[in-house]
Amino acid sequence: MTATADNGWQLSVTHHIAAPPETVWQVMTERLSEWWCPRPWRTEIVELDWRAGGRCTTLMHGPDGEQSGGEGIFLEVTPGKRFVFTDAFAKLGGDFRPQAAFMVGGMEISADGSGTRYFAWSRHWDEATCKRHAEMGFAEGWNAVAGQLATLAEGGTID
């Protein structure tokens, strides 16, 4: 799909996972720290409040000591189907605080034959931000995490 103003400057990836949606959802939500960022990076969960308006905050650690924070909120959590998050707001002390925004992202799953169709997307406020995300390696990174999620959901391990 081409990113346009009509689709919210959307970038997306789709992946088939050879595991039932219930298993995929469980791994997506209960083992997020194991698949959320491409190896050799790792994810530290600061807080995941799995409800609309809940805090969604992670810290990614690179192999050379780099760090990249992700402070945001969940906009929607539909158990067994999808979650949507944004970095447009931080939730601090129970209050929503606007902050410089980069995107709205979503992860969706649905039954696909004997497995699961995983669809992940990122929407942006403008074309320039969308292009910047693509140039940062959106396709490579988000495909890598989809593969990591699939490996875990299918019973494998990630080194």
Image (cartoon, rainbow, N blue to C red):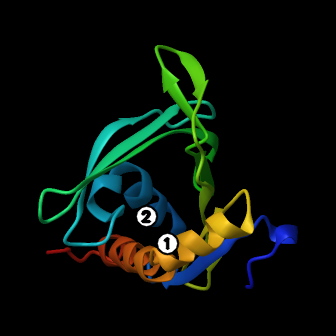
Q: What residue type is labelled 1?
A: Pro
User: How would you rate the neighbour count of disc 2 (Cα within 10 Å): few for under 14, some for 14-19, many for 20 or more?
Assistant: some
Give the image quarter of residue 88: top right
Label ID, residue 20: 1
Residue 77 on image: x %, y %: 61, 44
Q: Which of 87 and 116 is in front in this view?
A: 87
Residue drawn at (46%, 14%), measured in percent from left and top?
A: 93
> Does the CB distance between marks 2 and 1 fall below 8 Å?
yes
Residue 45 on image: x %, y %: 30, 42
Which quarter of the figure is the C terminus placed in?
bottom left
User: How would you rate the neighbour count of disc 1 (Cα within 10 Å): few for under 14, some for 14-19, many for 20 or more?
Assistant: some
Q: Mark 2 points at which residue?
A: 23
Give the image quarter of residue 10: bottom right
> Left or right of 74: which side holds 44?
left
Give the image quarter of residue 47: top left
Query: Tag 1, which secondary structure?
Result: loop
Query: Tag 2, which secondary structure?
Result: helix
Q: Is residue 153 depicted above or below 73 in this figure?
A: below
Residue 135 on image: x %, y %: 51, 79
Q: Which amino acid does label 2 sit on?
A: Thr
Residue drawn at (57%, 16%), measured in percent from left and top?
A: 95
Residue 101 on image: x %, y %: 60, 46
Residue drawn at (38%, 59%), measured in percent from left and top?
A: 27
